Image: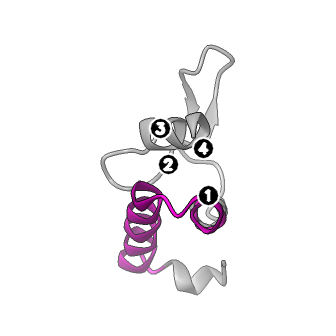
Amino acid sequence: MEAFNAVVFFRQKSGRYNHVLNTDLTVKDEFRIIYYEGEITFALARLYELTQDKQVLKMVKQSLDFMVDNDYGKYHDH
């Protein structure tokens, strides 16, 4: 679950995730590719499937809401 905590930590206030980190875990690039949010959301959904952790499910829902609000469907992502 440490990886999940890292995902939560690197989520921006907007709902987007920081895309690239430096080796010291500072942000190198806030945005690099449009599909990153879909990939992280898919990974979180798989984590929820394995753990049934309600906090993970909450993050999945928030990520999906962000993607819907920002019309990510036009990118044909997950």
Q: Earlier in the sequence, mark 1 or mark 4?
A: 4
Residue density around tag 4, few if under 14, some if 14–19, many if 20 or more, within 10 Å: some
Q: Residue furthest left?
A: 13
- The location of residue 33, given as percent across then percent down, is 66, 56
For mark 2, what is the residue? 17
Near-viewer residue (8 or 18): 8
Amino acid under label 2?
Tyr
Q: Quadrant of residue 49?
A: bottom right
Q: Is residue 61 above or below residue 21?
A: below
Circle number at residue 19 = 4
The residues tagged by marks 1 and 2 sit, at their Cα atoms, a distance apart of 8 Å
Residue denoted by label 3? 10
Q: Element at badge 4?
A: loop
What residue would you read off at disc 1?
A: 40
> Quick one: label 3 or label 4, which is nearer the N terminus?
3
N-terminal of the pair, mark 2 or mark 3, is 3
Q: Secondary structure at mark 1?
A: helix
Task: Tell me whether circle 2 and circle 3 mark residues in contact (CB < 8 Å).
Answer: yes
Position of 44 relative to 1 (above/below): below
Q: Looking at the image, is mark 1 or mark 3 earlier in the sequence?
A: 3
